[in-house]
Image (cartoon, rainbow, N blue to C red):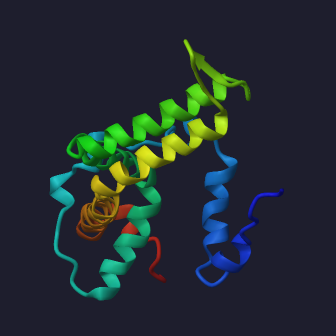
Amino acid sequence: MSGIQIPLDALTSRLNLGDRLQGLRSGTLSGRFSNLRPLGEFFDFKRLSKPANFAEMQSRINYNLGYYSSNYAVVFAMLSIYSLLTNWVLLFDIIFVVAGMFIIGRLNGADLEIGTFRATTSQLYSGLIIIAVPVGLFASPFATLLWLIGASGVTILGHAAFLEKPIDEAFSGEAV
């Protein structure tokens, strides 16, 4: 039985996400974070100001999202870790599922035998699902995900909108 094939082209063609995500697919994790900007530059309070109009805000966001993309990825990762550390039930459920899948995978298709108890891999996967799904639903993963999206959006887009471009970049787009 083959896996489900999702046509990414059909999903991303309207938003032009294919070109934007191509850089993420081709690069390594160390290459992704090799262009982290210094904290002094990222938190430069002297360059914080309210944009004059929507066009300036859009220009700042476009520039800063590209320039500080690795820093924003770190902010997103930190908010993700924070959301898991404040939702212990969800963290337990994720660790339980990962550890269960690892242990069942280590059996290599053999049955688990503990004394007189014997369980097939199918029974072990079923037991894992029977325990993990109710605990996962109790942990409110959708609320955590929505909080993560909202907190990341406000933090990242707020920073990108209020941080001015450097002086040399501010005049590079203007015609002389």
Q: Quadrant of residue 39?
A: top left
Quadrant of res 138: bottom left
Quadrant of res 120 = top right
Residue at (61%, 72%) from the top-left corner? 17
Residue closer to the observer: 4 or 136: 136
Q: Tell me what residue is drawn at x 51 percent, y 32 percent.
A: 100
Q: Is residue 164 above or below residue 77?
A: below
Query: Where's residue 114, x and y in %?
Result: 55, 15
| Depicted 13 relative to depicted 161: above or below | below
Q: Position of residue 14 (x, y in %)?
A: 63, 84
Q: Could you tell me if residue 38 is visible in this image? A: no
Q: Position of residue 136 (x, y in %)?
A: 36, 52
Q: Residue at x 30, y 68 (%)?
A: 157
Q: Is residue 117 above or below residue 130?
A: above
Outermost top residue = 115
The answer to which of 144 and 103 lies nearer the viewer is: 103
Q: Position of residue 11 (x, y in %)?
A: 65, 77
For the N terminus, the quadrant is: bottom right
Instruction: Return the residue nearer the eye: 75 or 166.
Output: 75
Residue extending furthest right? 1
* Residue 115 makes an appearance in the image: yes
